[in-house]
Amino acid sequence: MSNWIDVAAIDDFKSGTCRVVKTDEASVAVFNINGRYYAIDNLCSHEEAELSTGKLERDEVICPLHGAHFSLVTGEALTAPAYENLRTYPVRINNGWLEVDTELQWDIA
Ligand code: FES
């Protein structure tokens, strides 16, 4: 099952920025990095920090609270103090809008 949700009009979603999509089940941070779009759980797996306010470095987001790095591609926790991976979500462009599917999650082992 899928649940495609509008994130932003592509023309209004600037590179280097983030939008947050919230549903009853998920809070998803969606990043635009040079026209590549990534969707990942918004809450850090270490504590309750929101990654949407973190810094970007290549294809990684850095937690604003204690500095853990997460891969935006796979959701993998790359550095301490976070050890649990995050879920990532499919994105697509549809009629000029970026959409995220909050039902279909990709977990890595
Ligand atoms: S809350 Fe993210 S690294 Fe601690």
Image: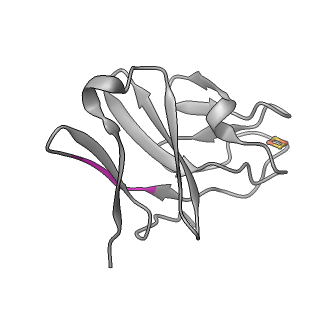
Image quadrant holding the C terminus, namely bottom right
Question: Percent position (x, y) of residue 19?
Answer: 50, 37
Between 4 and 87, the one lying in front of the other is 4
- Residue at 41% x, 29% y: name it: 32
Whether residue 13 is situated above or below residue 71 in the rendered picture: above
- Residue at 24% x, 41% y: name it: 97
Whether residue 4 is situated above or below residue 21 in the rendered picture: below
Query: Is residue 91 magenta-colored?
Result: yes
Residue at the outermost left position: 95
Between 7 and 29, the one lying in front of the other is 7
The reply, left or right, for residue 94 in relation to residue 55 is: left
Image quadrant holding the N terminus, namely bottom left
- Residue at 37% x, 37% y: name it: 37
Query: Overall secondary structure of the magenta stretch?
Result: strand
Q: In which quarter of the image is residue 71?
A: top right
Which of the colour schemes (rainbow, by chain, secondary structure, one colour) is used? one colour
Question: Percent position (x, y) of residue 102?
Answer: 44, 63
The reply, left or right, for residue 100 in relation to residue 24 is: left
Picture mark count: 0
Question: Percent position (x, y) of residue 88?
Answer: 49, 55
- Residue at 67% x, 31% y: name it: 53
Question: Percent position (x, y) of residue 54?
Answer: 68, 29
The reply, left or right, for residue 66 in relation to residue 19 is: right
Residue span colored magenta: 89-93
Q: Quadrant of residue 26?
A: bottom right
Quadrant in which ligand 1 is drawn: top right
